Image (spheres, helix red, strand yellow):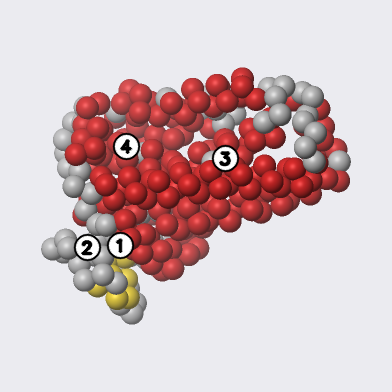
Amino acid sequence: MIIETSDNASPIAAHVSDADAPIVIRNITTADLRDALRLGWEDFKAIPSHAVMLCVIYPVLGLALARLVLGYSVLPLLFPLAAGFALIGPFAALGLYELSRRRERGEEPSAWDAFRVLRSPSFGAMLGLGTILLALFVVWVAAANAIYVATFGHQAAASMPDFISRIFTSTEGRMLIVVGCGVGFLFAVLALCISVVSFPLMLDRHASATDAILTSLKAVMINPFNIAVWGLFVAALLVIGSVPFFLGLAVVLPVLGHATWHLYRKMIV
């Protein structure tokens, strides 16, 4: 099977899946990105209770995490753990893709439809890629902790104000921000490249995890600028949703989940 781009671009050979129709990767525009977000918002408005139900775990975990780390030695990991949501989000949004897929077909999805993804022929492949993203998340947290220890040593912050003062008023703190954000950026880029269309493709065409990753990487190669812009959209919305106390993630995460499905539909035909 051949993956090829539109606009008379050269075809790129890749063995993708055993689906009947060939997979074509389109060149997308920033207008497509905005439209994907708009459609994601429309899906959320159409089925808000379902979407919030599926994603409420995130703000709950965020609040529990914030309460846990205050005054404890793991306080420096608060931001890395919160930022790590972006790494595992594509897998966690599987139910949202299913809801958007059904609504796209003219159906009226119910809450239970989101869990039909568990019976998908490719659920094993999706679980495998999800495990990879989870491992990436664990490595990122370990790396963030190592960077903090290398910068400040093993002495724990006494409180949240003390921690904030360390980060923003010292040379070491500014170095931590630069290095930490730089390393975190690399993890985020890797996660985005291997998962931008992988899970929707496995759900829609039952591709294997390997084939879905290869397709996702090809999609990034064909649309590097707009995929980078999409990543910035995601990062900005996650930051907005994390303030205050991660409560906004109950809206931001489902909207992004639905929007990712529509981005997939715009890139893969």
What distance separates the C-alpha of mark 2 from that of mark 4? 23 Å
Q: Residues within 10 Å of mark 4 (few under 14, many from 20)?
A: many
Kindly report which numbered mark, 1 or 3, lies closer to the viewer in this rendering.
Answer: 1
x, y percentage for residue 14? 29, 72
- Which one is nearer the viewer's eye here, 257 or 164? 164
Q: Is residue 91 visible?
A: yes
Which type of secondary structure does the marked residue at label 3 adopt?
Answer: helix
x, y percentage for residue 4? 29, 72
Kindly report which numbered mark, 3 or 4, lies closer to the viewer in this rendering.
Answer: 3
Q: Please, what is the three-letter code of the amino acid marked with disc 4? A: Leu
Residue lying farthest to the bottom in this orientation: 10
Cβ atoms at labels 3 and 2 below 8 Å apart: no
Q: Quadrant of residue 49?
A: top left
Q: Please identify the quadrant where the C terminus is shown.
A: bottom left
Q: Specify the label residue 160 is tagged with.
A: none
Q: Is residue 259 visible?
A: no
Which type of secondary structure does the marked residue at label 1 adopt?
Answer: helix
> For mark 1, what is the residue?
211
What distance separates the C-alpha of mark 3 from that of mark 4? 20 Å
What distance separates the C-alpha of mark 1 from that of mark 3? 27 Å
> For mark 3, what is the residue?
83
First of labels 2, 1 by sequence position: 2
What distance separates the C-alpha of mark 2 from that of mark 1? 7 Å
